[in-house]
Amino acid sequence: MPRTIRVAAIQTSYGEDLKANIEKTERFVREAAGKGAQVILPSELYQGPYFCTTQEEKWFATAYEAATHPCVVAMAPVAKELGVVVPVSIFERAGPQYYNSIVILDADGKQLGVYRKSHIPDGPGYQEKYYFRPGDTGFKVWDTAFGRIGVGICWDQWFPECARAMAIQGAEVLFYPTAIGSEPHDSSLDTRDPWRRAMQGHAVSNVIPVVASNRIGTEASGQKFYGSSFIADHRGDLVQSFERADEGVLVHEFDRDFLDRHRAAWGFFRDRRTELYR
């Protein structure tokens, strides 16, 4: 019997009410689980609005320690009840330091650990360097109840070395929670298609499925998020996708044994020349 993994991406909008955002995400997690999903990805920083459009110190008060973050505490019993894995995106406080992080909840609700976003953008509308330190965890993969997964966070998705590092560590599916949309400095700039192509390229070059979850809607800052969440297969083909304003869940199943054989046959890992990369 083949080993399979059934993945899901959530696409929705978020507001300033933390409790409402958690409850909304829980509803979509339940919907995805009802469709058979085993690993369910909400979008980046779903605890509230995407606050990094400007530099305002008030937002530091919305960071929590990873283990006791309200999103983590609320989602753990849901993951356990439904028997699903949920990568929970949070604004993390660790002593005097602040990170954009992911806590992986396994299907028993237990925390497998934390990944801290490695690449931190700094530009109009995405002023994250004011809020977040570069992650100190390195790229990580997780042995979950349903397979070995890798998770990068938003800006990480543009860097092929992030995807490759997770694939080298044996990831079977890559997940990218995201908050991306309009570019305030240039209204004519639409990054939706390049955003997708970058991750589809990771899928091709690593022979691995990719799941991307983005938010939608126009927030109080004026930032408009373009959704377009998707699930790509090992060829980079979009097997499930949303448009810019759709709301809901995408679900798709992959055969892990097929992917393992196909990855070996392509030879992308056999023919690596690490001595040249130095």
Image (tube, rainbow, N blue to C red):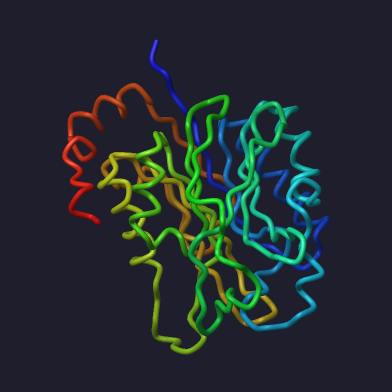
**Which residue is at the front of the view, 255 or 57?**
57
**Which residue is at the front of the view, 78 or 230?**
78
> In x, y percent, where is residue 211?
45, 46
Residue 167 picture quarter: top left
* Residue 243 relative to residue 236: left or right: right
Q: Is residue 44 above or below residue 222?
A: above
* Residue 218 relative to residue 192: left or right: right
Which quadrant, please, contains the C terminus? bottom left
At a point 49% along the width and 28% down the height, the residue shown is: 147
**Which residue is at the front of the view, 95 or 178?**
95
Which quadrant, please, contains the N terminus? top left
> In x, y percent, where is residue 7?
50, 36
At a point 70% along the width and 61% down the height, the residue shown is: 91
> In x, y percent, where is residue 19?
83, 55
Residue 223 picture quarter: bottom right
At a point 19% along the width and 35% down the height, the residue shown is: 270
* Residue 18 relative to residue 87: left or right: right
**Which residue is at the front of the view, 143 or 43?**
143
Residue 179 picture quarter: bottom right
* Residue 20 relative to residue 51: left or right: right
